[in-house]
Image (cartoon, grey):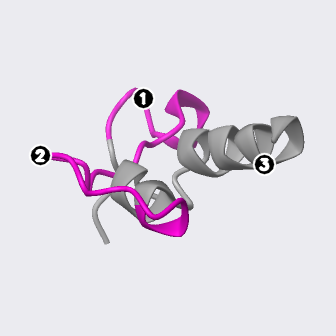
């Protein structure tokens, strides 16, 4: 349980999984606005997302 929670935390913080994807893996219902992917601040350019 601890290892699974740590895995989900890392995936969420690195933007690899959304909260709703994690909830689906745990057979939980999605939550409103749970399809957001986090962006680590050190991956932004001057605090902003870089558009391609």
Callout 3: SS: helix
Callout 1: SS: loop
Query: Which image quadrant: the C terminus?
Result: bottom left
Q: Quadrant of residue 2?
A: top right
Which of the two residues, 4 or 39, is positioned nearer the viewer here? 4
User: Where is residue 31 shown, x and y percent of the image?
Assistant: 20, 47
**Residue at coordinates 45% horizontally, 64% vertically from top-left?**
27
**Residue at coordinates 42% horizontally, 43% vertically from top-left?**
38
Q: Earlier in the sequence, mark 2 or mark 1?
A: 2
Q: Quadrant of residue 47?
A: top left
Q: Quadrant of residue 42?
A: top right
Which of the two residues, 4 or 14, is positioned nearer the viewer here? 4
Marks 3 and 2, how far apart in space?
23 Å
Of the two numbered discs 3 and 1 in the rendering, the one whose residue sits closer to the viewer: 3
Q: Which residue is mark 3?
A: 4
Marks 3 and 1, how far apart in space?
33 Å
Q: Which residue is mark 2?
A: 32
Local crowd size for mark 1, using a 10 Å CA cut-off: few (<14), some (14–19), many (≥20): few
């Amino acid at each position: 349980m601890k290892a699974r929670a740590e895995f989900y935390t890392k995936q969420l913080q690195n933007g690899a999984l959304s909260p709703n994807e994690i909830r689906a893996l745990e057979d939980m219902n999605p939550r409103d606005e749970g399809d957001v992917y986090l962006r680590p601040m050190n991956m932004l350019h001057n605090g902003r997302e870089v558009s391609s």
